[in-house]
Amino acid sequence: MEQAKQPKPPVCIRVKDASVRFNMAAERVDNLKEYFVKLMKRELHFKEFYALKNVNLVIHQGESWALIGSNGAGKSTLLKLICGILQPHSGSVTINGSIAPMIELGAGFDPNLTAKENIFLNGAVLGHSRKFMREQYEQIVEFAELQDFMDLPIKNYSSGMRARLGFAVATVVKPDILIVDEVLAVGDLEFQAKCRARIKELLSQGTTLLFVSHAKPPVLELCEHAVWLDHGEIKKLGATEHVYWAYEQYLNQKRKERLAQQGK
């Protein structure tokens, strides 16, 4: 007797026919004064650039998705769209649940404030009360391993130290959706492993993961599904191993074509 199929968890992210368009100056302008003069005289012409084109993506609660593709493929744009940092030119994005975004190093930090002050600032940005952040403060500092540097301004932190602090604050509670864009590429290998362990713990508790990395091992380790973006369009989506294999085949072909051109 066949077992009944388990119902899928509820949808937490739905991207429907979403496009993101930017207007780019069609000619070179060397300084700000020239830009405004041309703008006032209506002599400045723009051309449209689509960072994303008619993207459709449905992600269910508790799933782990990698976004892969070359630089400029639209990965970070898609994450910013999901976070609400960007609005779609057309289409729609629907989110069900709280988001803990780690898209850019230092986002939500004031460089002139100390690390201790920034913990409370970043916590407020994520919707946590000051009382809650006081209760979690020692745990955050311990995870980030920055006990001796909490009174230093963030502007004196290395990129790795900022990533440690940002990740510790973002994951102090279980978010519904965790978004990680390349920030684990900085810092030492031991701390990267510690972050991956924290992500796995969150996944086991039902957190949904969107993960961007150019490194193959963490993508395969953390993500069951993948989306391959190229020039703002989805080339392939599905199981991570299959999508990554197709992406690597594409890169190998492009490399062969480039070498053939150079050999002429």
Image (tube, grey):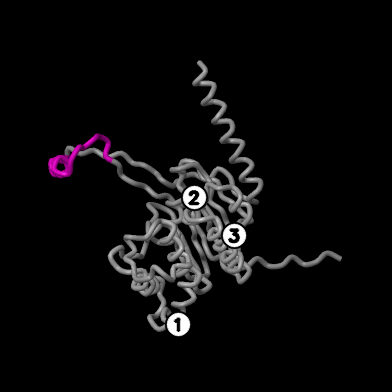
- Is residue 31 inside the magenta stretch? yes
Which residue corresponds to mark 2?
A: 55
Q: Which residue is drawn at 37% across and 47% down?
A: 21
> Quick one: label 2 or label 3, which is nearer the N terminus?
2
Q: Quadrant of residue 101?
A: bottom left
Determine which residue is flagged by label 3: 64
**Residue occupying the point 49% across, 42% down:** 70
Q: Earlier in the sequence, mark 2 or mark 1?
A: 2
Q: Do the residues labelled 2 and 1 touch (CB within 8 Å)?
A: no
Helix, strand, or loop for circle 1? helix
In reply to whether residue 41 is colored magenta, the answer given is yes
> Tags 2 and 3 in contact by the CB under 8 Å rule?
no
- Residue 18, image x, y percentages: 45, 52
* Crowd band around label 1 with a 10 angstrom C-alpha radius: few (<14), some (14–19), many (20+): few
Q: Can residue 35 be seen by looking at this rendering?
A: yes
Q: Mark 1 points at which residue?
A: 135
Range of magenta residues: 25-42
Q: Residue furthest front?
A: 148
Residue type at the position of mark 3: Ser
Where is residue 226 shown, x and y percent of the image? Answer: 59, 51
- Residue 99 seen anywhere in this rendered image of the structure: no
Q: How far apart are marks 2 and 3 (CA)?
A: 18 Å
Residue at 58% x, 59% y: name it: 193
Q: What residue type is labelled 1?
A: Glu
Residue at (58% x, 68% y) in the render: 202
Camera-near label (2 vs 3) is 3
